Image: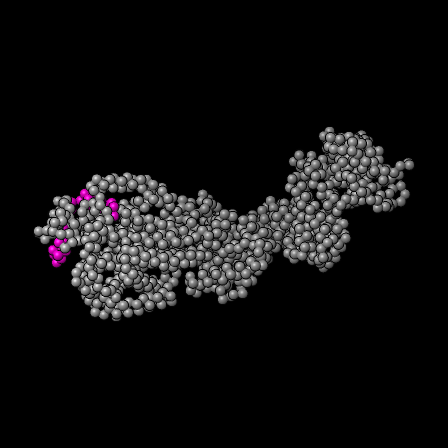
Amino acid sequence: MLKTWLSWVMRWPRTAITLCVALAAVSIWLTVERLGIKTDQLSLIKKNHPLIALTERLEPFNFDGESAFVVVVQAPSPPRAVAFAKALEKRILETPETFQKVFYRIDPERFKKWALLYLDKEDILKIRETLQGNAALIQAFVADPDLTAFLQLMNREMASRMIGELFTGFLDQEAAENGGETNDRPMDLGVLIETLEGLSSHLKGSREYRSPWSSFFQGSSVDPELKGYFWEADRELLIMSVIPVKKKNGFAFESNCLECLRKKIQESQAEFPDVRVGVTGQEALNTDEMLTVSADMARATWASLLGVLVLMFMFLRSFRRPLMEFFSLGVGLCWTFGWTTLFIGHVNILSIVFAPLLCGLGVDYGIYWFSRMEEEEKKNGVSVATVVRRVMERSGPGIFIAGLGTSLSLLPFVLTGFRGLMELGLITGTGILLTLAADLTLLPAFSVLFLPPRSPKRAALREVAERDVLRLSPKSAACVLVLTALLCVLSYIKGREVKFDLNPLRLQAPNAEAVIWERLLLEKSRRSPLSASVFASSPEEVREKSTRIEALPSVSEVESLFSLLPEDQEEKVPLLQSLLPLLPVVDDVAGHVAGIDETALKEILERIRFKLQDEEAERWGAARPLIEQISRARGLIEEVIMLLATSNGALEGLERYSGEFRRDLLTTWRFLREGASVSPMLPEDIPEEVRGRYFKDGVYLLRIYPKESIWEEGTLNSFVRDLQTVDPEVVGDPVSLHVFASAFKRACVEASAYALIFILVLLLVTFRSLFFSALALLPLGVGALFTVGIMGVAGVDFNLANSIFMPLVVGAGVEYGVIILNRWREGRMLPGHLPYSTGKGVLLASLTTAVGFGTLMMSHHRGIFSLGFVAWEGSLCVVLSAMIVLPAVLAFVPQPRVAVDTEEVDEKVVAVFGADDPFVAVGDGRGGSGAGSGSHCRGVSDPE
Amino acid sequence: MSQILNKAMEIQTRPDLAGEAKRKERASLVRNLIADNFLSDEMARESLKGRWESLSPKQQAEFRQLFTDLFQDSYTRMVLNFLQQENIEYRGESGKGGGRLVKTVIMRTNEHIPVDYQVVQKGNRWMINDVVIDGVSIVENYRNSFERVIRKSSVDDLLKRMKTQRQAL
């Protein structure tokens, strides 16, 4: 078959080259136009995995299955974060062709009616207590909701409390000691401080208004301006979900969206330099990861090609030949891209690494081709065509088998059923065959067209023939074996320390924006950002499952439609109604417009300040927080008085703040009255945008949050298994991660096993001996053990990226063993020696493979980096085992009989070594003694 | 009023009485000043306005004494704690007959506080029977607080609490 192919190529070399190049051009076009990128984790597992269908059921509950970017806003204050969010939302919605929705607040107006029902009973009691304790003050506020009047009331209250404390404080003190009710709790100055802060900032020109009433109620309830937002970390972080329009072109569209979003954030930040913002979430993480990896792989591929080219220049000592091989490799790569586009249609986070791998693995065949060609050219009076024909006849089958072997070590990935690996196996396995086809077509064609005939150099031939890469005496060979055994034991011991780290965040580029913000969110959030989900068909089932799940040790919280309703409504409603008599009706004064008297304001501030004597407060028993408040309030009053006296726009600011203050007071009081007269909230009362996340088309959804970080394997496993005891059909990110990690680990083991089985079968067919097959596998076994041992020493764990190193190095590892063993079986290798040509071929092939793997270490993606490191280290360990351990073992294996090329032997052997060479035995037409004699033989170089 | 305030100011600012170590001495002098110029008996009766008549003479006597002791102590503490080297502005007086309201303002930088004295003429002297600090009457404060205790428990309980407080002084 190879002969027929060769004769066609040699008859029409230009046509062959043109066809190859045309096919490569079509492949490039196809790739650019149609090759997709899949970033979804579930797209890597089995196509028919039940989890995929279950996860699809989840889509309607998550923005109708639309992907969402998570924008995290970190601002110096919550109002600042809200202001930024509003500005960003405006900008985002200016591009409706890219983004359809920004979700960062549930309109509190929709919940407002029931807002007080969401408070704890204790908080409601606290409000009642505040209202009772400040009844007179409140009545007066509402009767005259003016800033000066408010400060006058505050002053009056302070004077009253101060005098009460001084003259009759003992009455309350005794009542408190006896466990009775006291009238005079220490006065909280929070509302005064917030009012003064607001006033001060308005006097300075700010227009930002913050209601002081949350302080009045000790932060427990009323803060309508900041209600409804998705806060995290005690309002340090504001979370926004940005939903792009319906997916258009998969990854390309997502990455454009992300870029556009980041640009808009940057534009908005120009107005808010004090606000830090980042995009994260699964979509952003996936997109950032793929962008990083794609860019890194492009660089790695070029670096790999360059490295291979340099190695070939060095080893082949020619420019033309490496360039030919380089071209052929490029064509093979293009074909592989084209084939991938046509038959798979996309690459995923695993298969995207195929290009640099192919550069390292696929170049081997060209190396073997030119190595053999070099040797054939050294024979007298042979034309280029004859050389090419001889190379194809003699080394073609060997090269073909080597390629097939490597391909067969990768193609069995398909049997794992794990789509990520299946696609990687298919692409790389087929890629090897395509590269091989390119080599076997283009190299003969190029050779015929562009290579001039070389004149044989006798001296060089003699030199090459006599050189060995390795010479081990029996004693040295024994030492090597003992040392190897020792290292194997050490590697085994250290290798046991290597764990499996499934945390995908640790695989990503550490400085990627999405990773940085995801980590921040993880650190600061009250609960895990990831939740599992369980479906239910009735309210009863929701309650039953909630109860069972809440009892699980690994669960921290369960959310459902019913958990959105306020708790203990039956008890809270009457409690709230008891507030009504304490809340004055505000409608009577709504129309009243108060003026502002600057002098009166200053006068009252000075009177308040007189009472804020922190040094005296301590003496009459005020608690430390109150003393701090006194100090703060004193400072603010001084500031306000100074601003009133000196600031140009003071009056305007004062009037503005006074107006806001009045509006706020009226709103707050109306809100409180409405909240106090509420009836119990029903599921139908929950706004659709929230209800839809828990109930859709008759299906209820429970969201379950883990107690501990699920990024650790043990915690994740127990969380998922616990949930599966309640409902085996549990879904969600933790389940996907669990299924993905388990399936991936299993698939890697299976892929390695399948690769070994296929290779073993191939070896058995080739060698027809279990012993030699095992010997061929020896470098792989020893090399793999060393690799894991070094990982243990270096503290590198297996992860979701580098676990595939084993199946990847199987093909390469076995190839070296096969080549050395083949050479030994020719009977032309001295015990413990490794001939130059064989060693050179193996070394160059292994170095190019190591370059292919090693360039992966250029990746910023730590997963790809670790894969590069482990595979690079693995390939070097394997080649060292092949070049040192295998010859050492072979030194103690009985020597086979020499197979001699009768066509050339007499001429060559005599010409090269002379008839008196003591290692050459000529007579029966075969070099060396018979098998088992152990005598030394030396033959001509033959890389195969 | 001016004389009383000046005396109080003098006690507070005398170099030989300065410092925490001399607080007791200062307190004693201030207390004497208060005893000389305040109508404690009248104030006691006013603080139980509406209930005074229902008290037995013994309770009235006991209450009077307790009130005087406690008031003098509290007012002394107030003077010691709040009155420093400051200007006192006199803002006139109002009222006719035997009663007058003398208006003063204690002035400091960027802060002040109005203090009004309710005085009545007793013979040839003007005696204080209430002080209104920034709009809050001390007698009224007593009245409200005592009324709360009596309403919740009894006059005896009030007397008991006052006695306990006096013992603690």
In this rendering, the answer to whether A472 lies above or below A427 is above
Res. B83 image quadrant: top right
User: In the image, what residue occupies the spot 43% across and 52% down?
Assistant: A509
Residues in magenta, as a range: A883-910
For the view shown, which residue lies furthest in the front direction?
A459
Q: What percent of the width, then of the height, locates residue A52? A: 39, 56
Res. A625 image quadrant: top right
A692 lies left or right of A148? left
Nearest to the observer: residue B94 or residue A412: A412
Q: What percent of the width, then of the height, locates residue A780? A: 27, 48
Q: Is residue A643 visible?
A: yes
Q: Is residue B124 magenta?
A: no
For the view shown, which residue lies furthest in the top direction?
B167
In this rendering, the answer to whether A307 lies above or below B97 is below
Q: Is residue A864 visible?
A: no
Quarter of the image for the N terminus of chain A: give it: bottom left
In this rendering, the answer to whether A870 lies above or below A692 is above
Quarter of the image for the C terminus of chain A: give it: bottom left
